[in-house]
Amino acid sequence: MRVEQISQSPSFEIHGYQHRAGPSFATDHDLSVTKNAFWSYCGPLLEAGTDLPPDFYEWTSVALSCSLHTRLTPFLAFANEVLRQHGLDHYWLTVRATKATSDFDEPRWHTDEMFFSTRGGGLRAMPREDDGDNTLDLQTDWKLCTTLLGPSTMFIPVEYQTEARDTQQATRKHLATEHDCTSIRCIACAATSESVRERLSTQLKHMGAVQATIGECTFFRIGQKKGAVHSEPCMSGGDRIFVNIVPGRKAELKSLMNKWGMDFPRSWWIAPSVSRS
């Protein structure tokens, strides 16, 4: 299946990949999250059947009740095919496992900012009005995600995306504080983002939401001008395993990792409640 011109698509599009899966797809009903944890990898595309680093399986044994392989493999195969169609062979892949929580009972509407800005920035960087296209010859202005267990990411319906972005930008302009980000998780960015999201949960409520189902993934635009307004779903009803892919050129991703003092390529996992020697 060819996904045409992602970078020229509307704010977001939902595509199925379940056709790549065997009969055992999503039938491992014993799968659950045992500990909140995430695993990340940044480097060349991985072939799910052979290339997953050893620390992925270490993370799985800590965070999950059983193997994730039958659910993850079809998605990675599909994602690899689409990225190669668009001339890309590197990405930043994250798998996040979260136990049931009430933290997201209220939507946290936001857009994802450009990752490769020359200005730099944390994961929740607040853009400046003069940012424009200040990027490192950005190869992509989109990313993709899927959910392997639990509810999927919520998106404001396409017909309301422009209005939602305008509302977000006006609210952010009113609340933002000018500063430079100096770490992967900027405290000032996070504080401002939380204030913005609190207001947006009320302001955008009338627009409704769209979600992918199991076996589907969402391609969505990033950046303040055309980015898709989306939110984590309510997770009070059960565990969630979420996969996020940021595609990019080797030089872009290497620069991003080096800026944060990390080697490239690399993989790592973090489980806050687990002590590691």
Image (tube, helix red, strand yellow):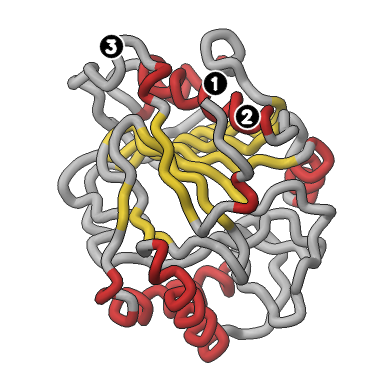
Which element carries disc 2, helix, strand or loop?
strand
Residue beneath disc 1: 55
Looking at the image, do the residues carrying marks 2 and 1 touch, with CB atoms under 8 Å apart? yes
Asked whether, in this view, residue 254 is left or right of residue 184, the answer is right
Does residue 39 appear anywhere in the picture?
Answer: yes
The image shows residue 198, relative to residue 45, as above or below, that is: below
Q: In terms of secondary structure, where does tag 3 sit? A: loop
Q: Which residue is identified by label 3?
A: 24
CA neighbours of label 3 inside 10 A, class few (<14), some (14 to 19), many (20+): few
The amino acid beneath tag 3 is Ser
- Of pointers 3 and 1, the one earlier in the residue sequence: 3
Binning the other alpha carbons within 10 Å of mark 1 as few (below 14), some (14 to 19) or many (20 upward) gives: some
Q: Residues within 10 Å of mark 2 (few under 14, many from 20)?
A: many
Which of 107 and 103 lies nearest the eye of the viewer? 107
Residue 271 seen in the current view:
no
**Picture residue at 27% right of the left edge, 44% below the top:** 151
Whole-angstrom CA distance, mark 2 to mark 3, is 28 Å
Which mark, residue 267?
A: 2
Q: Amino acid at mark 2?
A: Ser
Amino acid type at circle 1 is Asp
Residue 55 locus on image (x, y percent): 54, 21
Pointer 2 or 1: first along the chain:
1
Helix, strand or loop at label 1? It is helix
Determine which quarter of the picture holds residue 103: bottom left
Q: Dividing the image into 4 quarters, which one contains the C terminus? A: top right
Between disc 2 and disc 3, whose residue precedes? 3
Write down the quadrant of residue 121 in the picture: bottom right
Q: Is residue 35 above or below residue 232?
A: above
Q: Position of residue 276 (x, y in %)?
A: 50, 29
Q: Looking at the image, which residue is at 79% across and 40% down?
A: 254
